[in-house]
Every structure is written in C-alpha cells, then in structure tokens.
Amino acid sequence: MIFSYNWLQSYFREKLPTPEKLAEILTMHSFENEYIEKKGSDYILSIDVLPDRAGDCFSHNGIAREISVLLNKKITYPKIKTKEILKDSILIDIENSDDCLRYTALIIKNVKIEESPKWLKERLEVCGINSINNIVDITNYVMLETGQPMHVFDYDKISGGIITRKAKKGEKISLLGGKECILDENVLIIADEEVPLAIAGIKGGKKAEITNETKNIVLESANFNHKLISTTARRLNIRTDASLRFEQNIDPNLTSYAIDRAASLIGLPSSTKIDVYKKKLKPWNIKINIDEINKTLGIDIPKKEVEKILKNLGFIVKENMVIEVPTYRQDVTIPENITEEVGRIYGYDKIPLTLPYFSEPAKINYDIFWQDKAKDIMKELGYSEVFGYSFIGDQEKNDFNLTVREIINPVSSYYKYLRPTIIPQLINFTKENLKYFDNVKIFELGKVFDKRERMVLSGAISSNNYLLIKSDILALFDKLGINKFSFGKDEIKIGKDVIGKVGIKSGITFFEIDFEKIQKNAIDNKEYKHVSYHPIASRDISGLIDENTEIEEIVSKIKNIDLVKSVEVFDVFKGKNVPPGKKSISLTINLQSEEKTLDGEIIDEIITKIKKTINWEERK
C-alpha cells in the first residue's frame, strides 16, 4: 500500500523523522516497509499492511495514528465543517442488512464539475491515482485518507430511490470504462427502481455517471459484507481500490465520518444526510491481567505504561483493567491481542535476551521426537518437506468432494475452511513443481481437522507407480520399528485398525497416515551394528507366489534369513501369462557378511533357501 510522506507529515506540527528512519520505526513496531521512492518534493512509502490491520490502516489516518503512538507525538486530524438544509431527500432501501451493514448518502445540489486544485491532484498522483474531476477526486482522496471507499451518482439520473439488493440472473450493467457485465443472483448491486447503478463495493455503472453537465449529486458511503465483495471481485475479475478495501473488515461506523469529510472538502451546503444502519457495531470489552501480560512478554512493564500505550492506541481503560476496544480495531478480540499490542509498541528490542533456566534436565517430548525422526527418514528417502496452510478454499473442497468445517472468522475470504486432509495441497504443490523439475517427491507432517484435530504424515510423488510409494512406506515403517502392518487395496492397516490411505490422482501417487497411530506403534530400540568392510552382493529374482500372500509377509520372511541385508520389491503383476491363483513378483535381494566377501556358491545357497522359505515357483 502506497503512502505519502508529506501527507503523513500534515497530521503533525512537529517534524517527523526522515522517510528512511520513519520506515525503520514502522518496520520494527507495526508494518514492514518494502521500499522508499522520491517523487517530486514528496516521498512514497510502500508499507506492507497485514490483512488483520487492513481495516484500520489502509489509510493515511490509520498510519498517522500508528506514528503518533510510536513517536509519542500529538496528532491533529482534519477539521470537518458541514451544513444541512432539510429539504431534499432520497429513499434508501437495504433488502438484506447482512449484505449491506450500513448505507449513508448525502445529496449536494448545484455543484460545479471542474478540474481539481493542484494540491489535490498532487496528493492523488503520489498515491498512484489519476485526477478525473473535483468531485470524483475528493471521493478518492477521502478513501486514501480514511480508508472508506465512496461513490458518487448523478442525482437527476436516479429513478426513484436507491436500493441495495442481489442482482437478478441475466441482469446487465455497463460499467464505467465501458465493460459490460452479465450478473447473477450472487452479485450485490446498487440499483434504482429501474436498473443497476453499480456493483456494490467494486465499480460504478454508466447510468448515473457524473459528467461536466451534472448539477446535483448523491454521495454514497456504505459498508458491505467483505466476503461477498471478495467473492464477487474474483468471479467478475474486477479488482479496484474500493474492492481491495471492502474485502477487509472496514469499520461500519466510518461511513458517516467519511461522507462528512467529503462534504466539507466540496464546501457546499447539502441536504439531510440519509443514514440506514440497522445492526450497529458497538465497542466491546476485554478483561486483561498485567501479570499475565508481563509473564507472556518476559519483562516487567509498569501498569501505568501499559495503560498509556493502550490509551494512545485508542483503547479505553476502565476499572479493574477492563479494556474497551474501538470498533476500528476488529482484529483485537482476546487478551492475547492486547498483549501483542503492548509488546510491539513497548518494543520487542527492549525485552532482555535470557536463556531459560532448567532446574533439572528436560524430559524428552516424544511428540517432537517422533515427528523429527519421521521427517529425517522422509528426507533420507528423497522427499522434500513442504508447508501448506491449515485452510483451504472452495476449489479444493469441490475437486476432492471434501466434508469440511467452515471458519467463523477466516483470515481470508478464500481460505475459509479447515483442511480435513493435506492431499489436495500436496497434489497441487506437485503439479506446480513439475513445471521446474522432472521428478517430484514431497511430504508434509501437519495438522488436519475433521471430527477432531489430528496430526498426519502425507506424501506425494510425480508417478502413478503404486509400488514406488509403497516401498517408501515400507522403509519408513522399518526405520520406525513398526513391523505388524499390512496394505489393502487403498488402505494401510496395523492389525484391524486402518491408519492411512494410498491412492493415485492425476498421475500423482499419494499417501496419508494418522501420525498419532504411527507414534503409538513406533519403537525406539537403538542397536549398534558393526559396519561391514565387505561388499554387498545383489541378486534380482522373479517368480510366482500365491495371490493371497501379502508382499509384506514375503519381505519379512526373507529379512529373517542370515546374511540378508535388505529386500526391495520392484514389480508385482497379475494377468496374462500368470497362472490363475498366482501373482508374479520381482525382488532385489541384497546380501552381505561382516566376516568375508560372499562367493557365488554361498549366494546361490542363500537364494535357494529364500525360495524354499516363501514357496517360490519359477516362472515358465
């Protein structure tokens, strides 16, 4: 988000630090600054405002408020002067207050559409917005100043009143700029009694567009459902400065202030303000404990200092440390949020670096122990670790027909479900990496959420060879000391307990295993084995076994024979040229002695013993 240094300076009588120093302070305490650029007599600060603070800091007012707290400087907001004449009005109808939380309108008569003054054009230009005319420029200016998007209609082109409603299927609108959209019943619009006037929160239409001949206008300052705006903007592929802000949780109490600010800048008398606000958002209280704050931060901050920080941030400190949160801080909902605010303003750099003190050796955390061990094994098997979000969207839900739990307050309107499995993300990651690599093997050990929160180990390879991933699972279990397991068609079992699944989708083979069940059955038996100085002798054998015999049973029996180092299965086949009731299997047997190099005669004897042990039939 682009901010003007000179504009920020206008909030303070005292001189601000240099742009570079100011960016450093904001980075340390609030938001990271991506770059600084000189533009004429001004400087651009590109500040990376995080999504949880977009509601109050996608504006110069918000950033100036942060600066005021960090530098302990008095802030002065622009004065607002309005005058109302009780003659004209317009009917405002909100069909669903969940879609439009508040709609504030103001009629201004006898305006003159002309070029904007130099100062206004310069401020817009620094922030990357082109000047259009004085009225439109003022609405854009107020948006940059307050964070509240606005729109302006030609009052004389509106038929009847203004209605916020869902569009009818097939309803059309010609937008400013010439684009025509065909709407459906999922799109929220601003309409009059005849046709749509605008796509709510995104872009205005041509029907009530202001021109050089416009004499009377209606200013709109509204608050729309952020999820609805986000979904509509993506579906219609229309992203605007307004939609970018409406996609966040903007304070509905801001609409009236913003419209008064715009009227003050226009400097003309206006008719009565029309304000429809059915479900008012009020400040909420959070009880905090100073001792808990200091314990969490690891430092003793005096109570008066905590109170000062919170008051400077706009919070009201009541009796017994009950904190009233202003409605523009919708990201602050729990005591831990208050602790974070105190910590970042006080300065994490002031917290002393101290090593934790242990009165006795720490006990092994077996959750972490087995997780680290499993990760190390997967990496030894050639897998790369990836980290996905714990959230998924409609695309993953629909593509994999998932039963999901929707998040009440998602961090993003897209990532609105808790993932019940990691598989969709791994498949997408694999497809993406195949653009750059010929072969991909990835895994993630992370949490999923179905009936309860669980830890799972998931892996995927860019191959539809079921045996490859099965071989890796065998190696994983072997190194974790798990022996009593079996594979079904698409299941992995320990005894009768299903602990995981294996499958193939879009040419990608995957597995997912309940890690809690792995951990329950894993054995940490460390046994020292002398490393042999003699070479390994390998033999490939192919033959027939009973079709009902489990591969794991065959491998286990072979491993119990003396001098067998390891066994690898590289092919299993049933079908043409294989007798009924049989299946063909191909193995690599690795043999090694700690005492001598094995000669051909000994190797042949071992292979013969192996074949007898597993009832091996030679292929004809």
Image: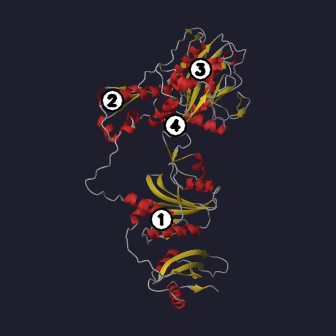
* Label 4 – label 3 distance at C-alpha: 31 Å
What secondary structure is marked by label 3? Answer: strand
Q: Quadrant of residue 296?
A: top left
Residue corresponding to mark 2: 305
Q: Quadrant of residue 192?
A: top right
* Label 3 – label 2 distance at C-alpha: 47 Å
Furthest toward the left, the residue is 359
Residue corresponding to mark 1: 377
Whichever of callouts 4 and 2 sits on the residue coming sooner in the sequence is 4
Residue at 56% in and 78% down: 588
Which callout, 4 or 3, points to the residue nearer the camera? 4
Q: Amino acid at mark 3?
A: Ile
Residue 526 seen in render: yes
Residue at 51% in and 48% down: 389
How far across and down, in percent of the image, does residue 510 sit?
56, 61
* Label 2 – label 1 distance at C-alpha: 50 Å
Q: Amino acid at mark 2?
A: Glu
**Mark 2 Cα within 10 Å, few/some/many (few <14, many 20+)?**
few
Q: Is residue 554 above or below residue 472?
A: below
